[in-house]
Image (cartoon, grey):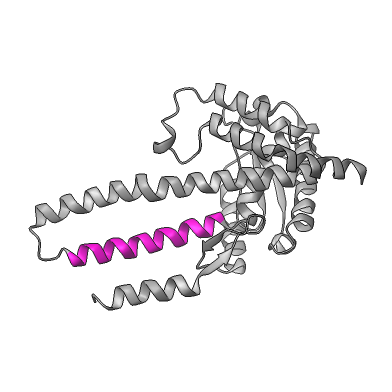
Amino acid sequence: MRVFLPSLLLLVLATACSTVPGTGRSQLNFMSAGQEMKMGAQAYTEMLANERVITTGSDAEMVRRIGERIARAAVDLLPESDAKRFRWEFALIDSPDNANAWALPGGKTAVYTGLLGITQDEDSLAAVMGHEIAHATSHHGAERVSQNMLLQLGMLGASFSMKDMDATERNGYMMALGVGTNVGVTLPFSRSHESEADEIGLMLAAHAGYNPEAAIGLWERMGAASSGAPPEFLSTHPSPGTRMDRLRALMPEANKLYQAALKR
């Protein structure tokens, strides 16, 4: 067992590495695109089954219009991605108290009506939808699943290596290891996903013809709406201030895409 676990870890790492379209970052991913798309389609059906989906009206049309433009931008700007294989769908969910949006593997995307009061305009909503769509094109969901599987395997190995310890002492070490893994690995990993989706999503929205500068005002409003949030190091998301600083640094590149889009 002592030899088997390290050997298995090396085999897993050697066979499950891929690259994120748009940033080139290496990622761990045990799932195929087909598996992700199947899971995403099933989850989409289940999630919408208990929601009131708005299919008509200007807001629903706006969500579909923005989504379709960003989906085309993803196919164009990220040719190495699976965006052209995705079966895109864009839904508006009637939930005035929920200021949220999400995109599942395979391009199934939803926006809650509570978000529209914060986005306020199409350019800002495009920044949010670009961010969520970037999670899907970057296979972040599959990467999180893969990371959790690897961490569980590592915890199993750690537990086995301490099998001769007193039970109380072993449980204390395992609890500390679990907390350390969460704060030192899982949360920073989630924040890196959010930052990566911010970057790719900003470029997708700009390439689709939406003003990337709107993202700054959006996160200012998001920050005002999320007072009382936990410190960044204890959160799955970067702080609004961190996000705005990073977006400002990316703005020259995004504006080039936006200006090129306006000329097309």
State left or right for residue 245 relative to residue 253.
Answer: left
Q: Quadrant of residue 221?
A: top right
Residue 67 at x, y percent in the picture? 75, 45
Q: Residue at x 32, y 73 (%)?
A: 6
Boundaries of the magenta span: 140-161
State left or right for residue 221 relative to residue 178.
Answer: right
In the picture shown, does residue 188 fall above or below 19? above
Q: Residue at x 57, y 31 (%)?
A: 98
In the picture shown, does residue 54 fall above or below 26? above
Q: Residue furthest left?
A: 166
Residue 12 at x, y percent in the picture? 43, 72
Residue 153, magenta (yes or no): yes
Q: Quadrant of residue 38?
A: bottom right
Q: Residue at x 44, y 34 (%)?
A: 232
Q: Quadrant of the N terminus?
A: bottom left
State left or right for residue 146 relative to residue 78.
Answer: left
Main secondary structure along the magenta-highlighted residues: helix
Residue 49 seen in this snapshot:
no
Q: Residue at x 31, y 63 (%)?
A: 154
In the picture shown, does residue 138 fall above or below 99? below
Residue 55 at x, y percent in the picture? 75, 40
